[in-house]
Image: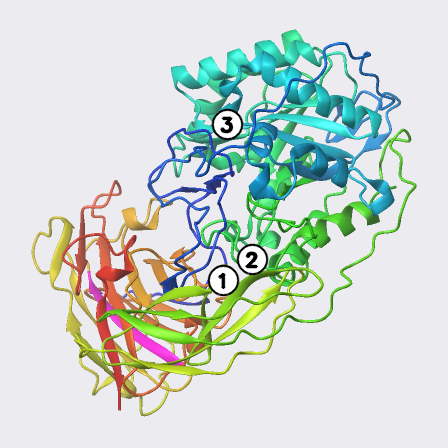
């Protein structure tokens, strides 16, 4: 028998959907992708087993279109800025490119570092929700007497400008911003902040209307940079980088030419398809023109920074690159920007420091758009859960490094958070049943004496299950189960209170179990062999064809079995498949196994980002994709070819699945297998439990399995 065996650790890169930015312009995203919405009440809240009942979320559903529609009444109309203003004059030198570097007029290497502000029209319309108007926040981030040292600010201009017209928008907002930045020795990056398909007539109309007005208006200002197009959300030609780039370049090159005709000396920043995550294509196929800089957008759910060299690092060795978006927030969008300073921010800075020519603008200096860097009292957020202090400190520490002499770097020293005291613990916890699978927990609000309480962390049976910014959360539980609940409060600089007193809640009803998972006598060796430890474990067959068609027993089928111990959840799958095909970059289009785990059996209608997972495992040697845990370093798996097809074996530690095991613990689970017979697209898919192909998007479709002795 021709036998191959693969032993590996799970890859840390999760093949989750990429995303556009807050303040999306209403363009259409590719299904399966998501946009960090910029609605006024946007506050991304992680809700693994429940949904906070009094908080809106910034993240659109995977198939939703991004929106800029407000959710509250705007404040009074701002007045136009005075027309009798002196000319805008800047001491900053005009920038240009030289090889991989941005340089000044004397050839000195320049690296710009700063942040994005929120969109100015929106900020003024909804200043009551932000806690400050736009001009107050602009003054704040350029205040060297308070330790702020940005050398560049990125100004996102969403299609909100259509509310007043581009010319009025420029006179009312951009003129004042450009003047303020000139007066404060800060470069200003005017960003046409589109998040939409690039190859439509409407997109072309928006681009030409905007740049025909804006490009000549600031062409003579040495401190202005143009960011042509924020993010293209499609068409992406997944699996074919060249086709995606060709599609983009065909329509974007005329826009570059248009702006260059109006502003022959202004540096231009160019995005790319897949939410500006393809700067590597500029190596072999750059745009035509001078003084072009290629943008990159990078967030925690896009991967470990150390593994992004091919996409972001390689082009920076040959052409100018700026990371014009990055950021994180502990409760951010689980498909995009959910992360921590220690887990992602510090590694990101370390990685970026290996490319000394790459500048950056962090996303975003705001209290509402996410990931947030200030609270609504405009306390700077920090600690392990927020990026505000991280970005401010980074600007300060690099203020004299490759900065034009005209940029003022004298001022106050950066000081870190002074608040080292956690808030008080929440009190007065209570619970009430909503139905047989849901109950609500509530508590009294908490005030922090030094900064503010940003969110509450809810613990169920000792494990974190979600966070809420209001004093209530809806928990999805299992009929018949009993839960112990406690809550903590977390402040603006990530100090967490003691846990509240614990309350218990007994769910009504009786659990309906689809399969029992026995305790292992001893932990199996993860080697893709059926050793003695599996001999008494029931094998369950794939039963349902949920996509395509299956041509006989040899074409597609198989079994799965599982067991557990105090350390891990073990799964062994034998797949029958008489034709091997692994030609696509999208695993679900090839021969592959998909395991679905809802570790706390919360049965939510969408993935909660904490203990709902999809593991898509390709046949043969390849990276695992899907919706993965943030830390998969301790997950083990092995794979081998068999006479009938292939076999896979897994050990998922409970620490990775974010639950504590016990007898009678219930989980959501399904095993599904994809089949490609002819090196094209998928021909069929079978499932053990599901009767529709919806588990990839909907954990409520999983079976219920229970741990038993």
Q: CA distance from mark 1 to mark 2?
A: 9 Å
- Magenta segment, principal secondary structure? strand
Quarter in which the N terminus is drawn: bottom left
Coordinates of residue 3 in the picture (x, y in percent): 31, 67
**Label 1 with label 2: CB-CB less than 8 Å:** yes
What residue would you read off at disc 3? Answer: 194
**597 shown above or below 238:** below
Coloration mode: rainbow
Disc 2 target residue: 339
**Residue 630, numbered label:** 1
Q: Is residue 530 magenta?
A: no
How far apart are labels 2 and 3 at the CA level? 25 Å
Nearer to us of marks 1 and 3 is 3
Report the quarter where the C terminus lies: bottom left
Q: Position of residue 545 (x, y in %)?
A: 12, 55
Q: Please say whether residue 462 is visible from this viewpoint.
A: yes
User: What is the secondary structure assignment of the residue under circle 2?
Assistant: loop
Q: Name the secondary structure under disc 1.
A: loop
Label 3, residues with CA under 10 Å away: few <14, some 14-19, many ≥20? many
Q: Is residue 669 shown above or below 663?
A: above
- Which residue is at the far top? 261
Q: Which mark is residue 11?
A: none
Q: Nearer the viewer, residue 573 or 395?
A: 395
Q: What whole-number distance in Å separates the C-alpha atoms at marks 1 and 3? A: 29 Å
Q: In terms of sequence position, does the residue under pointer 2 or pointer 3 come before the other? A: 3
Q: Which residues are magenta?
A: 568-576
* Earlier-in-chain disc, 1 versus 2: 2
| Left or right side of 261 for 91 | right
Residue at x 69%, y 39% (from the top left corner): 115
The image quadrant of residue 284 is top right
């Amino acid at each position: 028998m021709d036998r191959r065996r693969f032993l590996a650790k799970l890859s840390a890169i999760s093949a989750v959907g990429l995303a556009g930015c807050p303040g999306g312009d209403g363009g259409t995203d590719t299904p399966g992708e998501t946009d960090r919405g910029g609605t006024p009440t946007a506050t991304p809240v992680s809700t693994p087993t429940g949904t906070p009942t009094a908080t809106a979320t910034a993240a659109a559903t995977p198939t939703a279109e991004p929106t800029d529609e407000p959710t509250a009444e705007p404040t009074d109309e701002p007045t136009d800025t005075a027309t009798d203003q002196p000319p805008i004059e800047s001491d900053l030198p005009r920038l240009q490119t030289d090889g991989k570097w941005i340089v000044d007029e004397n050839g000195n290497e320049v690296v710009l570092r700063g942040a994005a502000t929120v969109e100015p029209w929106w900020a003024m319309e909804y200043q009551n929700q932000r806690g400050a108007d736009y001009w107050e926040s602009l003054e704040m981030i350029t205040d060297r007497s308070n330790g702020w040292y940005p050398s560049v600010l990125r100004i996102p201009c969403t299609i909100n400008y259509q509310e007043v017209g581009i010319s009025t928008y420029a006179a009312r907002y951009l003129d004042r911003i450009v003047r303020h930045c000139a007066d404060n020795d800060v470069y200003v990056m005017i960003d046409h902040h589109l998040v939409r398909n690039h190859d439509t007539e409407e997109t072309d109309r928006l681009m030409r209307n905007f740049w025909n007005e804006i490009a000549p208006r600031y062409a003579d200002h040495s401190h202005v940079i143009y960011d042509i197009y924020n993010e293209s959300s499609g068409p992406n030609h997944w699996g074919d980088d060249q086709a995606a780039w060709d599609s983009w370049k065909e329509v974007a090159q005329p826009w570059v030419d248009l702006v260059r005709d109006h502003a022959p000396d202004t540096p231009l920043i160019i995005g790319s398809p897949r939410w500006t995550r393809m700067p590597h294509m500029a190596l072999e196929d750059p745009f035509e023109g001078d003084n072009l800089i290629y943008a990159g957008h990078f967030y925690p759910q896009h991967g470990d920074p150390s593994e992004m060299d091919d996409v972001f690092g390689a082009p920076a060795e040959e052409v100018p690159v700026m990371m014009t978006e990055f950021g994180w927030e502990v409760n951010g969008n689980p498909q995009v920007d959910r992360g921590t300073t220690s887990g992602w921010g510090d590694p990101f800075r370390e990685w970026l420091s290996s490319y000394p020519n790459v500048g950056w603008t962090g996303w975003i200096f705001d209290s509402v758009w996410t990931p947030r860097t200030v609270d609504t009292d405009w306390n700077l957020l920090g600690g392990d859960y927020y990026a505000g202090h991280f970005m401010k400190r980074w600007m300060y520490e690099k203020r004299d490094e490759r900065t034009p002499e005209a940029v003022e770097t004298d001022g106050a020293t950066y000081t870190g958070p002074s608040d080292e005291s956690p808030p008080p613990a929440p009190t007065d916890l209570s619970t009430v049943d909503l139905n047989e699978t849901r109950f609500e927990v509530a508590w009294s609000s908490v005030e922090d004496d030094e900064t503010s309480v940003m969110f509450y962390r809810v613990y169920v049976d000792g494990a974190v299950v979600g966070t809420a910014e209001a004093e209530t959360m809806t928990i999805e539980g299992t009929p018949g189960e009993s839960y112990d609940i406690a809550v903590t409060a977390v402040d603006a600089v990530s100090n967490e209170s003691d846990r509240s007193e614990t309350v218990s809640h007994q769910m009504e009803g009786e659990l309906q179990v689809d399969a029992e998972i026995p305790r292992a006598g001893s932990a199996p060796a993860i080697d893709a062999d059926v050793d003695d430890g599996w001999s008494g474990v029931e094998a369950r067959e794939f039963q349902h064809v949920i996509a395509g068609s299956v041509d006989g027993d040899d074409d597609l089928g198989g079994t799965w079995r599982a067991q557990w111990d105090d350390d891990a959840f073990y799964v062994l799958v034998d797949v029958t498949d008489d034709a091997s095909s692994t030609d696509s970059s999208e695993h679900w289009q090839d021969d592959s196994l998909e395991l679905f785990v809802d570790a706390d059996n919360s049965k939510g209608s969408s993935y909660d980002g904490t203990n709902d997972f999809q593991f898509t495992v390709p046949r043969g040697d390849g990276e695992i994709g899907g919706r993965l845990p943030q830390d998969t370093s301790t997950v083990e798996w092995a794979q081998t070819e068999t006479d009938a097809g292939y076999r896979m074996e897994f050990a998922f530690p409970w620490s990775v699945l974010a639950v504590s095991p016990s007898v009678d613990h219930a989980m959501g689970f399904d095993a599904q297998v994809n089949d490609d017979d002819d090196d094209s697209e998928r021909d069929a898919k079978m499932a053990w439990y599901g009767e529709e192909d919806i588990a990839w998007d909907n954990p409520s479709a999983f079976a219920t399995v229970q741990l038993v002795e």
